Image: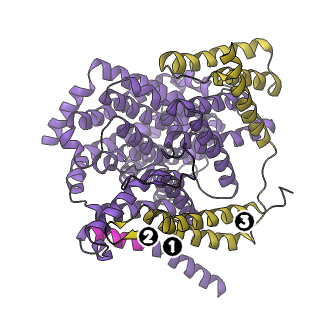
Chain colours: A yellow, B purple
Amino acid sequence: MLQKLNWRCVLFLVTAVLGIVWVVLGFGTYGFWSEAEGPGAGFFPAIIGCVLTFFSIIELIKSFSSDQVKFDKEALYIVGSVAGILILNFLIGLFPALVIYYVVWLKFIEKYPWKKVILITIVYGGIMYGVFSLWLKVPFPTGILLSWL
Amino acid sequence: METLSMLMEGFSVALSFQNILAALAGGILGLIVGAMPGIGSLAGCALLLPLTFHFNPTTAIIMLGSIYYANMFGGAFSAILINIPGDAPAIMTALDGFSMTKKGHPGKALFISNYSSFVGGLIGMVILVFLGPALASFGLNFGPSEMTMLMLVAMTSISWLVGDNPITGIIASCLGMMISTLGIDIVSGQIRYNFGSIWLLGGINFIPLVIGFIGMTQLFDLVKQDMSGEKLSYVDAKIRFRDTLLTKDELKRATRPSITAGLMGTFVGFLPGAGATAASFLAYAAEKKISNGKTLVPLGEGAIEGLAASESANNGAAAGAFGPLLALGIPGSGTTAVLLGGLMMWGLNPGPMLFTTNPDFAWGLIASLFISNILSLAISLGCIPWLQKIVRVPIGVMIPSILMICFIGAYSTSNSMFGVVIMLIGGFLGYIFGKCSLPTSPLLLAFVLSSTLEINLRRAFLTSNGNIAVFLKRPITDVFLVIFLIMVLVPVGRAIYKKVKENK
């Protein structure tokens, strides 16, 4: 189903709609021009919206005859990785989530031996933790499980 | 003479112990990050920007300038050794550089790349020293109408530079400008386009957006290569320093293109919106015309001239881009846009007054570029055997490493998960845009330039009571208008001519 969609059509349809939204809000809600104050907050976005809609419609028409866009199945690895990190972040916090993801990727996707996995993770994770957490004192989120503890 | 004495003062600022240390650290980090495929100078600068927060503004920007400059050197390493450009300007480098590697001369290719980068950078810096202040005093004549027209020219040049279909460039530019309108209107203070979300009140942070669009988007290609089992480590032999040295003839063949491409690259770098990528493309195309069959091997098949042209132009443009950045506050590329963000974060407003109000800073930065150029050359030549180990990090390790740094970098810019969300949206959109042939660099450049365009456009209309003739009354605006019209009409005319010719 997803592969049958003409994604170029969808993309330029979305950009055209976005352009219209920007024009409508620019003229209607935020104000395009007032006699006393000149150009309003909606002036510039409305113009950009007009230009975007115009060119999006041209590309939309052209896209009907364009080839299908094919997405790679391999992209799902990135989608899965991101989803996993976000769920783990919610539970145990960002940094531990990233370390677990790192280990899982090296061990189960790349099939590295444990010794190598641990060594690479310690070196790279150590540099990241040292620079961002210890040196720059970035307060990484801790997650609900670690907050309870 | 005055320029030279100011430069000498700049050297006295840049040559302080702390600043040299910062430039050295920036040089090493920049080379490492630049050499890592998939990160590149833009994302590299964005990722390393937080490291500079702990210094005073001058030291911080010297370090950032050094990171930026060393990135340009490092970007060529992965392009030459494993055919993956570390950044966009290194795309042309990969053509001849990787061909040389395949022919068994990776060391020579790396040496030529470093030598040409140094020559191009040096040419760019010398021009910057003499034209930077001139450009600044010229910039004092720029009012809202001139700035509006300049921004329009810059925006147009971005759109027309993206290949066969300028319409997609315009759409991407408009999207970038639309994203920049989210949040509070800078002129009136009115909240706009936040759709009821408190997260959007402050607008969109540029750095997570860049990390997403550039850094994360690369992962989709890397994971595809990884899963297809493509071997990336073509270089098995050790690269020793003596193998990298050039013969007299090879040096001669690299010098002429380095000088011509360095000059060309610098002037392209001075143009807002053009940047190092356009410079390396243009210089490579020009070198193809200049050397027309006179090279030992054709360009694209391991020609020293092609490699030298691409690398020299790339670094010339990197230096040239500092001209409009410092003198007019206009970033010439995505990476200088990150530098502009950094400058603003430290309360420095680049523009015509920078050389007057902060001469220490402006000249210290220019002097530090000379130092960075020499340091980068020394470090990269000496570290060739070690650096190749970094670029030979297996792709399977590279993928989780890049994703990890994307998350951490995006989070640390705002200390909030909103930054991560922006990065992820940018990453996925970048992938979809790439598949649909919608370029992302115009979006990022337009995002950065947009607020300056909007403010000046509205000011111009305010001061002229809405009279559009304000853009026609001054000589500078007229010049920009002519450039703007040429840039818009020439491709249209060419397309019509092509169509008519096809129909015949």
Residues at badges 1 and 3 in contact (C-beta under 8 Å)?
Answer: no
Residues at badges 2 and 1 in contact (C-beta under 8 Å)?
Answer: yes
Establish if B303 lies above or below B62.
Answer: below
Spatial CA distance of label 2 from label 1 is 7 Å
Q: Give the range drawn in magenta.
A: B477-487
Residues at badges 3 and 2 in contact (C-beta under 8 Å)?
Answer: no
Spatial CA distance of label 1 from label 3 is 25 Å
Q: Residue furthest right?
A: A1
Which amino acid type is marked by label 3?
A: Cys
Q: In the depicted view, which residue is nearer to us: B242 or B229? A: B229
Q: In which quarter of the image is the C terminus of chain A?
A: top right
On the picture, is B390 further left or further right than B326? right
Labels in figure, total:
3
Please state the horizontal and vertical placement of residue B460, each as a whole percent of the image. 30, 66
- State the residue position of label 2: B487
Kindly identify the residue that appears in the image at 73 percent across and 21 percent down.
Answer: A100
The answer to whether tags 2 and 1 share a subunit is yes
Q: Is residue A19 visible?
A: yes
Kindly identify the residue that appears in the image at 22 percent across and 37 percent down.
Answer: B358
Q: Is residue B39 magenta?
A: no
Q: Which secondary structure, mark 3?
A: helix
Q: Quadrant of the N terminus of chain A?
A: bottom right
Establish if B7 lies above or below B270.
Answer: above
- State the residue position of label 1: B491
**Is the magenta region chiefly helix, strand or loop?**
helix
On the picture, is A106 further left or further right than B329? right
Q: Which chain carries label 2?
A: B
Kindly identify the residue that appears in the image at 61 percent across and 45 percent down.
Answer: B426
- State the residue position of label 3: A9
